Amino acid sequence: DAQESRGLGDVYKRQEYGMETKRKMSSMETNNKPEQLYKYVLEVDFPKPEWSTYVLNSLEVDKELRANKVSKTMHVEGNTLNIEITSSELKMLRTSVSSLYEFLLLSVNTINEFHSF
């Protein structure tokens, strides 16, 4: 728990230096399926464009375990890393978003160890 708390504190410190996150979660009906899709959108702004590319490359390695239930798309626009996760099950979406944040924190911590602002 202490390690996790420290990690979250590190994220807040980094946000002061220019890394910003924008989150949006929504649900939508699909045209071709009667089931409901849940969507989570995350935009992370980094101080340098190459940092967003570093993080994208790190996150792309982590494939979804249940690709038939969860879909993740990621791309970089300038300094911003854009991530969208969709799922037909809210529980699967929550699990995927949680995993994403763990890897995102690890990537940001690694960048901060080897690069200065």
Image (cartoon, rainbow, N blue to C red):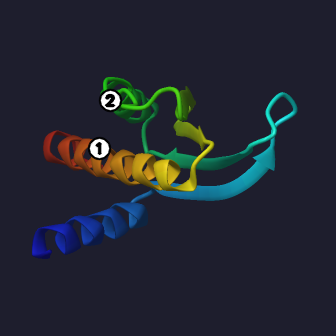
Name the residue type under label 2: Asp
Q: Position of residue 12 (x, y in %)?
A: 36, 69
Considering the numbered disc 1 on the image, is that residue within a helix, a strand or a loop?
A: helix
Comparing labels 2 and 1, the label whose residue is closer to the camera: 2
In the displayed structure, does residue 16 sit left or right of residue 107? right
Residue at figure coordinates x 21%, y 50% from the top left: 109
Q: Position of residue 76 (x, y in %)?
A: 54, 29
Residue at figure coordinates x 47%, y 27% from the top left: 67
Q: For the residue carrying disc 2, how many other residues have a C-alpha within 10 Å: few (<14), some (14-19), or many (20+)?
A: few
Residue at figure coordinates x 29%, y 68% from the top left: 8
Is mark 2 in CB contact (under 8 Å) with mark 1? yes
Extreme-front residue of the structure: 34
Residue 69 lies, with reference to residue 7, above or below; the image says: above
In the displayed structure, does residue 27 sit left or right of residue 84? right
Residue 103 lies, with reference to residue 5, above or below; the image says: above
Q: Which residue is mark 2?
A: 62
Q: Nearer the viewer, residue 93 or 110?
A: 93
Considering the numbered disc 2 on the image, is that residue within a helix, a strand or a loop?
A: loop
Q: Position of residue 100 (x, y in %)?
A: 38, 45
Name the residue type under label 1: Phe
First reached walking from the N terminus: tag 2 or tag 1: 2
Residue 70 lies, with reference to residue 17, above or below; the image says: above
Q: For the residue carrying disc 1, how many other residues have a C-alpha within 10 Å: few (<14), some (14-19), or many (20+)?
A: some
In the displayed structure, does residue 12 sit left or right of residue 10? right
Position of the N terminus by quadrant? bottom left
Q: Which residue is mark 1?
A: 103
Q: Quadrant of residue 10?
A: bottom left
Q: Position of residue 65 (x, y in %)?
A: 36, 31
Disc 2 to disc 1, how far (Cα)?
Answer: 9 Å
Q: Nearer the viewer, residue 103 or 18?
A: 103
